[in-house]
């Protein structure tokens, strides 16, 4: 069963639509500017705030009269509340990165960093299987980047002993890596 709107209801609705159009024309530019400041210069987010504010104004159009207080004051307070709600919502979510800010080089450097961490863990695991004498010799030669002569001097052993320890330590590490790979 279809209902027919009365002429009074149609006039009121048309009057409300005109009043709202006038309200939007007068206050929207200022709302967007205010919201842009609230949203740290993000014009897109400011547009969202202004749109949500005007939607709430449409829902409460009957309250927006000068005799009940400043319309501009009501709109800016609502815009402020909407912006704060968006800030809180964004803070409770993981950090958002705009696609334009994505940098392939920084992503590659993150991959490199992850590989470095994996390598360090692997080296630590391998060194755990080597005797303390061999471990200290490998640390001096490879991790401290010393020559065999400098490592021998620091360890207080002959150069031949350093070479022998390095050989045996590397052999142990190779055999462990073969076992881990299998």
Image (spheres, grey):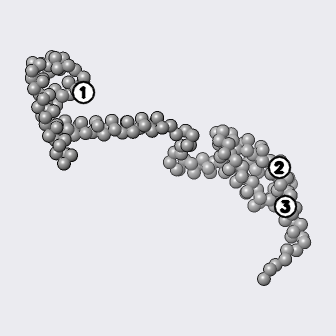
On the image, the x and y values in percent for residue 130 come to 14, 35
**Of callouts 2 and 1, which one flags the residue occurring earlier in the amino acid sequence?**
2
**Are dots 3 and 2 in contact, CB under 8 Å?**
no
Spatial CA distance of label 1 from label 3 is: 78 Å
Name the secondary structure under disc 2. Answer: helix
Q: What numbered label is drawn on residue 117?
A: none
Residue of label 3 = 16
Disc 2, disc 1: CB below 8 Å? Answer: no
Mark 2 lies on residue: 25
Q: Residue 143: which quarter of the image?
A: top left
In this orientation, does residue 71 appear?
Answer: no
Give residue 15's position: percent from left, percent from top: 88, 61
Residue pointed to by mark 1: 143
Q: Please indicate, yes or no, whether residue 176 appears anywhere in the rendered image.
A: yes
Mark toward the viewer: 1 or 3: 1
The one nearer the camera, 37 or 180, is 180
Q: Residue at x 25, y 39 (%)?
A: 122
Q: Quadrant of residue 167?
A: top left
Residue drawn at (53%, 50%), measured in percent from left and top? 92
The mark nearer the N terminus, 3 or 2, is 3
């Amino acid at each position: 069963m279809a209902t027919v709107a009365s002429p009074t209801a149609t006039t009121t609705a048309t009057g409300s639509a005109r009043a709202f159009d006038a309200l939007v024309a007068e206050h929207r530019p200022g709302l967007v500017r205010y919201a842009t400041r609230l949203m740290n210069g993000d014009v897109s987010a400011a547009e969202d705030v202004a749109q949500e504010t005007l939607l709430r104004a449409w829902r409460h159009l009957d309250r927006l009269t000068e005799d009940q207080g400043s319309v501009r004051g009501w709109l800016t307070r609502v815009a402020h509340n909407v912006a704060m709600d968006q800030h809180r919502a964004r803070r409770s979510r993981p950090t958002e990165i705009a696609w334009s800010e994505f940098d392939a080089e920084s992503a590659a450097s993150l991959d490199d960093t992850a590989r470095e961490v994996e390598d360090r863990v692997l080296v630590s695991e391998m060194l755990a299987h080597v005797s303390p004498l061999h471990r200290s010799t490998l640390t001096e030669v490879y991790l401290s980047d010393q020559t065999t002569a400098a490592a021998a001097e620091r360890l207080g052993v002959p150069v031949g002993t350093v070479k022998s320890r390095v050989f045996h330590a590397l052999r142990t590490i190779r055999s462990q890596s073969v076992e881990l790979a299998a």
